[in-house]
Image (cartoon, rainbow, N blue to C red):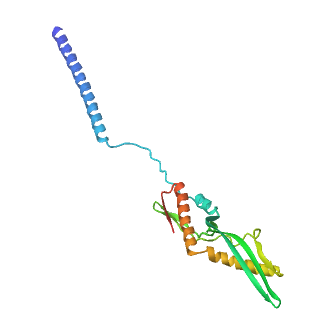
Amino acid sequence: MGKQDNKLLALLALSTRLKLWLIAAAVVLLIVAGVVLVWLNRNNHVAVETDERTVLSPTLVQSMKDIGEWEFLTISDEEIIDTVRHGFFGDDQLVRIYYGTLRLGIDMQQVEDNWIGMDKDTVVVKLPDVTLLDDDFIDEARTRSFFEEGKWTQQDRQKLYLKAHAAMQRRCLTPKNLETARKNAREQITALLHSLGFPYVRIE
């Protein structure tokens, strides 16, 4: 019985040592596996990025069209217009002073289809040329006669009004003023689109 007990104790001791070795080996494997995983994923990371680019939505396009008449240059003018009527007993003369304010700009309701769009990261805007926004630019309330001799009808005054109207257009709708209005249009529309979040704009 003594020898058998000794053998049993020896087997138990061997079994215990074997279990300890297995546990130690498992721990070492886990540590090695952890180190390998960390090394393999050292350059990998998870991040949430937000695309903050502004979208050229139909609502935005319509809101720009809803601006309506967009004025880019205002010109105030004053014209002295006269007319003379020759008669047998002498001449009649009428001299009137006219004041007008001519507004140059673009009517956004007149833009063509597909007038604005994206070309990669650039907003491309195709606009009609600047024009006179209001043909009724003479302030008739301020119009007054500077000199009047003889009798003049309303028809005579209307002819004088039309002469003043044409004179103001000749004086104000010059190539220089039109180019200034175009330059202002490009700058103001570009500034608006920049403020809406579009960094690159091309006006055509």
Residue 132 appears in view: yes
Q: Position of residue 148 (x, y in %)?
A: 79, 78
Q: Position of residue 82 (x, y in %)?
A: 73, 80
Q: Is residue 82 left or right of residue 151?
A: left
Q: Give the number of callouts.
A: 0
Residue most extreme to the left = 3
Residue most extreme to the bottom = 88
Residue 137 appears in view: no
Q: Quadrant of residue 67?
A: bottom right
Residue most extreme to the top = 2
Q: Position of residue 7 (x, y in %)?
A: 17, 14
Q: Residue at x 70, y 75 (%)?
A: 80
Quarter that holds the N terminus = top left
Q: Nearer the viewer, residue 170 or 134?
A: 170
Q: Is residue 96 left or right of residue 196?
A: right
Q: Position of residue 94 (x, y in %)?
A: 77, 79
Q: Quadrant of residue 140?
A: bottom right
Q: Residue at x 18, y 15 (%)?
A: 10
**Residue 83 in the image: above or below residue 38:** below
Q: Nearer the viewer, residue 113 or 68?
A: 68
Q: Nearer the viewer, residue 36 or 51?
A: 51
**Residue 4 in the image: above or below residue 20:** above
Q: Is residue 129 left or right of residue 79?
A: left
Q: Residue at x 31, y 40 (%)?
A: 42
